[in-house]
Amino acid sequence: MQELAINIADAREWFPHTKETPYILVQVNPEHASTWAVALRGAVRRCYLTDDFLERRAGELEKQLPGTNAFCQAQVIASKLPDAGATMSGDFGEILTYIYQSAQAYPNIAFGPKKWRLKQDRTKPAPYSDVIHFVLPQWPQPSDRDELLCAEVKTKATDGASEPIQDAIADCGKDRTSRLAKTLLWLKARAVGESLGNVEIAHLDRFINSIDHPPATKRFRAVAVICAGLIDEELKKAPLQTSADYTLVVIVVPGLYEAYTAVYRAARSSTLPEGQRP
């Protein structure tokens, strides 16, 4: 979470569990959700591009376009963030799950690729498994305490025909059977040609070549991020028994559409002041 400049100990308070079985129910407090436009504007922007990239590219763009450096930064940010709509909603659910999954691993450090930086098209979701974290408490020495955390995320902010709980469960099955392995290989291929931030090829190889290392634990989550106004109807479709293969997490956000819209609006204007540039 250091890459996103989020204090994970503080963020833990955003996700209180109000139920543990047969699924985890997380009910976000309205007061917390109302702070996200400020608290997450820089973090959401960093999910798509780093401070270093933003400053460097804006400096290059300043020589080509009329306007201030701040104007050029805003243009760079706009070129990376999704437009309003289904992709923005889905991305926000994934980013919220990334923060939640990090919080659940605390005090261990969980880190993973910001897949939103690797999009080929900002108007579409990132490919493969949604959210991945590595927990490597003795790194650079692999150990049997190592964990790989993988979450499949579905988001429902407005009323419609989608079924986020069932869809998250179904697609979590794809992660367990084959998609996670494909995701790790895809990430390694991308890591050869570009930086994945704090994720290195050696971290990926620890799980790709798992037979060469001590046994590691893989934990799978099916996560449904749902607006509070829709939750009663959606929970009627939740399973009545706990699964041995995955953990279902339902994150309830009051005013989800308004919350993520405000966050992305703030992220678009989260340029780097002169005194805070790298």
Image: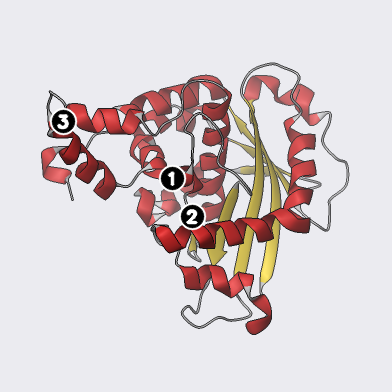
How far is the residue under mark 2 from the one under mark 1? 9 Å
Report the amino acid beneath label 1.
Arg
Q: Is residue 109 left or right of residue 268?
A: right
Report the amino acid beneath label 3.
Gln
- Which residue matches tag 1? 117
- Which residue matches tag 2? 113
Residue 245 in percent (x, y) is at: 81, 57
- Which residue matches tag 3? 64
Q: Mark yes or no: residue 105 visible.
A: no
Secondary structure at badge 3 equals loop
N-term mark: 3 or 2: 3
Residue 79 in percent (x, y) is at: 36, 30
Residue 245, label in figure = none
Q: Label 3 neighbourhood size at 10 Å, few (<14), some (14-19), many (20+)?
A: few
Residue found at x 12% / y 23%: 66
Secondary structure at badge 2 equals loop
N-term mark: 1 or 3: 3
Q: Is residue 98 above or below residue 235?
A: below
Residue found at x 41% / y 27%: 264
Residue found at x 49% / y 73%: 202
How far is the residue under mark 3 from the one under mark 2? 32 Å
Q: Label 1 neighbourhood size at 10 Å, few (<14), some (14-19), many (20+)?
A: some
Asked if marks 2 and 1 touch (Cβ < 8 Å), the reply is yes
Q: Mark yes or no: residue 166 visible.
A: yes
